Image (cartoon, rainbow, N blue to C red):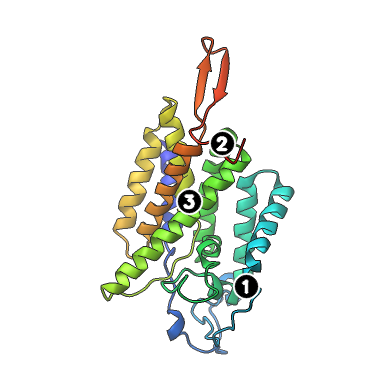
Amino acid sequence: FCFVFLLFFCLVVGQRGRRRRPQPRHQRRPPTRTARPSWEPFGGVYARDWAMRRPAKQVTAKYWLWIPAFVVALAVAYASTGTWTDALIALNVLSFLVQCYYPAWEDEGVLLSDTLKTPGSSHRLFLSAFLHAGWYHLGANMFGLWQIGRLVERPFGPGRFLMLYLASALGSAAASLWGKRFAASRGREELPTVGASGGVFGVMVALLVFRWRHGLPFQELWLAFVLNVAVGALSSSVDNVGHLGGAASGALVALLWGPRYVFLLGGVLVRDVPLIRWPFV
């Protein structure tokens, strides 16, 4: 019960603010010298209410360099921490600190409905998963990732765990993007998306699938998932479509690439026989 409560608390708090942002890009006001409230992180350097309106950048031929830069950042974080759970937490914290001191990082990374339509915007599919709406949003998501990620990374191994997390984050972004465009077609207000909760949902559901597949108790995980989806459905500030996309992606990866232990010789030998081995063998 304590595990369910902590997981529910972390994901619910992590959901809050996932879609919060004051103004779409075309409505942003120019920089202002108005004194910022002292309760904002770092004395207000995290300038959400004063998001800058900048002229559109010219997309250069080297725009694709964000991909190797992202790979290098992942490699350095993993080499420094030793586990992907800790590496992803470190990258999220570092990204939030960059948000605090350089608001343009957030401005360039939030997931908007024009992602993929606007040249030079594909990076938002991943970068938005490393941005957060505030300290509580960041702390709750990272605590949830730390609690669940360690349990999943052990049986999955580093390669499959990284694939699981990134696929969940990408699936969450894709579902959220579809939801934004669908809402826009109905004349609803666009709410940009940030947060790692889509990836955390995917990791949680992957643990649920792993336990279900091997006959282990999974009811508390299922309860936590249902409660979080139900709470998200009641809040207009939660990107529930993104959460469901991350959960579905995590379930798919766990089913196809996740550990599937086969016991031989009366349990003396144990083999991991996933449905799809490539590219991990």
Which mark lies nearer to you, 2 or 1? 1
For residue 100, side relative to residue 257 (left or right): right
- Which amino acid type is shown beneath numbered disc 1? Tyr
Q: What crowding class fits label 2: few (fewer than 14 Cα within 10 Å), some (14-19), or many (20 or more)?
A: many
Amino acid type indicated by mark 3: Ser
Q: Which residue carries the number 2 mark?
A: 156
In the image, 131 versus 220, the foreground residue is: 131
Q: CA distance from mark 2 to mark 1?
A: 33 Å
Q: Which residue is tagged 3?
A: 168
Q: Residue furthest top?
A: 266
Q: Secondary structure at mark 2?
A: helix
Quick one: quadrant of the N terminus? top left
Q: Is residue 197 visible?
A: no
Report helix, strand or loop for mark 1.
helix
Residue depicted at x 50% and y 63%:
125
In percent of the image, x 68 and y 63: which residue is there? 69
Q: Position of residue 82 (x, y in %)?
A: 70, 44
Q: Amino acid at mark 2?
A: Phe
Location of residue 270 by image quarter? top right
- Give the vertical position of 76 relative to 187 (above or below): above
Q: Quadrant of residue 226?
A: top left
Number of the label disc, if any, that sits on residue 63: 1
